[in-house]
Amino acid sequence: QVQFVESGGGLVQPGGSRRLSCTISGRPRTDGVGWYRQAPGKQRDLVAAIGSDASSTVYVDAVKGRFTISRGNARNTVYLRMNNLKSEDTAVYFCNTFPTREPNWGQGTQVTVSS
């Protein structure tokens, strides 16, 4: 069974930065990994994704130029560096495989952008 553990969230001021970490255990069906987020009352959406080839990345328009997804030295670790955070980035952030998602999600990590 594949498991995801997200960490690194917290309270950050507008314009601030945060780095999220995702650790994956088990044997995912696909090598791609995505970061997803869910704001209160909204659906869970993709934010960024990285392929098995770390040079292959995808970002939604709302975070382009501000967020960077990367792989750690251990292939089961994926990071999301978030710069110039805005109030609209407030959400619970999850990781999962991409484009095919595993059925079991982690607990996520809360990022709150507020002064």
Image (tube, rainbow, N blue to C red):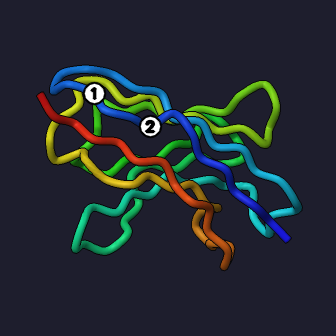
Q: Residue furthest bottom?
A: 103
Q: Position of residue 114 (x, y in %)?
A: 16, 34
Q: Is residue 5 left or right of residue 95?
A: right
Near-viewer residue (84 or 68): 84
Residue shown at 63% from the left, 43% from the top = 22
Amino acid type at image mark 2: Gly
Q: Is residue 84 left or right of residue 107?
A: left
Q: Position of residue 30 (x, y in %)?
A: 75, 64
Residue shown at 25% from the left, 47% from the top = 90
Residue under pointer 1: 12
Q: Are marks 2 and 1 in contact (CB under 8 Å)?
A: no
State the SS at label 1. Answer: strand
Crowdedness near tag 1: few (<14), some (14–19) or many (≥20) residues, C-alpha within 10 Å: some
Residue 49, compared with residue 7, is above or below; it is: below
Q: Is residue 12 left or right of residue 6?
A: left
Residue 9: which numbered mark, if any? 2
Q: Position of residue 28 (x, y in %)?
A: 80, 64
Residue 103: which numbered mark, if any? none
